[in-house]
Amino acid sequence: MAADYDEVRPDFAAASEKTLKDVQQADAPDAKSVVAELEETDLSDGVELPGAIVEEELSVEVLPQAADEFLCASCFTIRHRSQAVQKTGLGVICRDCASELA
C-alpha cells in the first residue's frame, strides 16, 4: 500500500487545532484600540531622541585648499604635499592609497 506523505498526521492536526483555538481565545487588542492608543500618544511634544539635533542650525567654516595641499584622486581627501606619492592620469595619489593599491 502506498503512503501519502503529504497528508497531515493526526497528532499534528490536533495540536495545530488546539493552538489555533488558544490564539483565537487570547485577549489580543483589536485594530481600533491600537489606532486609538497611537493617536493618544503624540510624540512630537517634548520627547527628544538621544543625539538628535532639534531646531539647531549647523555652521561650518569652509577653508580653501592651501598651496601646500593636494586632493587625493583615490580617496578624495585633502592631504599635505609631503604625503603625495605618485601622479596618475587622474591626479595625485596619497601615501595611504598607494600602499592599499600595491
Image (spheres, rainbow, N blue to C red):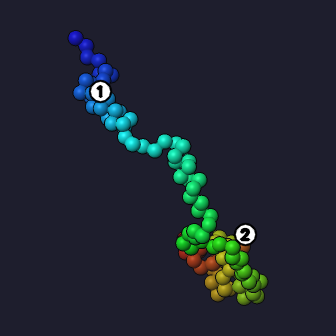
Quick one: 3 or 17, which is closer to the camera? 17
Q: Residue at x 69, y 73 (%)?
A: 55
Looking at marks 1 and 2 on the same chain, the residue that comes earlier in the sequence is marked by 1
Which residue extends farthest top?
Answer: 1
Q: Is residue 56 left or right of residue 49?
A: right
- For badge 1, the amino acid type reads Ala
Image coordinates of residue 13 in percent, x first then y, are 29, 26
Q: In the picture, which quadrant includes the N terminus? A: top left
Quick one: 97 or 15, which is closer to the camera? 15
Seen in the picture, residue 6 relative to 76 is either above or below; the reply is above
Can you tell which mark lies on residue 2?
none
Residue, disc 1: 13
Image coordinates of residue 72 in percent, x first then y, are 67, 75
Seen in the picture, residue 7 relative to 87 is either above or below; the reply is above
Quick one: 16 or 23, which is closer to the camera? 23
Q: Residue at x 24, y 27 (%)?
A: 11
Image coordinates of residue 17 in percent, x first then y, are 32, 29
Residue 92 visible in the shown view: no
The Cα–Cα distance between marks 1 and 2, rounded to whole angstroms, is 71 Å
Residue, disc 2: 89
Secondary structure category for the residue under label 2: loop
Q: Is residue 25 left or right of residue 87?
A: left
Q: Which is in the foreground here, disc 1 or disc 2?
A: 1
Q: Residue at x 68, y 85 (%)?
A: 81
Q: Residue at x 38, y 35 (%)?
A: 24
Quick one: 73 or 57, which is closer to the camera? 57
Quarter occupied by residue 67: bottom right
Quarter occupied by residue 94: bottom right
